[in-house]
Amino acid sequence: MEMEYITYEQAFSINLGLLSAQEQQCLKEARITILGMFAGGIIAHMLARLGVEQFTLIDAARYLPGDMNRDIGCYVDTVGRYKAEVVAESITRINPCARVKTVIRKLGLDELSPFIESCDVYFAQTDDIAYSCHSLILAQQLNRCAITSMPSGLTGFVEVYPPGLKKVVDPAALFGSPPGLTYKKLYYFLRNPLNRCGRRWHITEGKWRIEWFNKWRNGKVIEAQLCPNVWLNASLASIEAVKYLTGKWPIVGVPYMWHPVTAENRVEVQKFRRRSWWFERIVTRIFDINLLGLGRIYRKYTSRRLIRELELMQAQENKGKPVKYPFIWKHFI
């Protein structure tokens, strides 16, 4: 059966219950660049359904069977296809007038610059966190609004880096990583099993199973995700883009960020926890002390302590008992 042509007004006029015609026009004319189609594909769908018509989608990955639990474009018949191309097709099914450019190869940061510079809002959603962090720094240097959604288990963080910040904010440093690391150094820092133990909020707030966390810190599995939580965080990121593009409501800009913890029935705007930041920063500095090998000694001690704590919690989990977090996990991490 032949479908009747649907006008822009027919598809998106319901938005005028919240937005003026001029504000809707701002959405229509907005230029969006999205790096990574994991949560980025969800964001693209949402913005397309808001009436945005100009997209650049960047992702070299193809859909795998394991993407089925969370990726909006992953179906039995799209496994093996490029994510960016599938999402682009979905956008034009929503709005045939949408203009979507796809890039299906990994870009160097220098190659990424023109795609960020030519957009109004940039989303960093690649699974390579080090690459995302450096691209967010690049977006700030280019004076572009940058947004990232970081879901994990049953929690997450949504961060907005608006243009005009007084100084460039290092996203990795916000979470306790040493500031100013090159991409390569940050990449390996974030994959170090001992450093990954510092991401204990994956367990305390994300509610990961201890067994999965242990496998993840050793590089054997990817981050634990549930579809509704991924889509919730993507929704918050999309709302922030609407607020910025229309200028209608105040955005949640860094150092404040959205922080849903759905297992505890909380969706809040919080300033990043300074106690966690200081704890991580101090520990990593102690690790680097060369005098009398103190850094190496403390690193070994910390590693043994963390392994003991995880083994104890793993035993509780294996017995079907509630996991009891160590005091420092609950009050300092």
Image: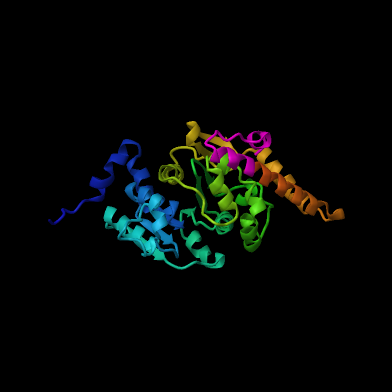
**Res. 257 visible in picture:** no
> Viewed as shown, does residue 220 lie left or right of 40?
right
Q: Does the magenta stretch include residue 34?
A: no
Q: Residue at x 22, y 51 (%)?
A: 7
Q: Going 36% across and 51% down the picture, which residue do you hit?
A: 45
In screen coordinates, is 187 left or right of 17? Answer: right
Q: Nearer the viewer, residue 257 or 164?
A: 257
Quadrant in which the N terminus appears: bottom left
Which quadrant is the C terminus positioned in?
Answer: top right
The boundaries of the magenta stretch are 311-333
Relative to 130, say whether 262 is above or below: above
Percent across and percent down for residue 231 are 41, 45
Picture quarter containing residue 5?
A: bottom left
- Judge by depth and name the residue closer to the eye, 206 or 137: 206
The spot of residue 124 in percent (x, y) is 50, 54
Image quadrant of residue 271?
top right
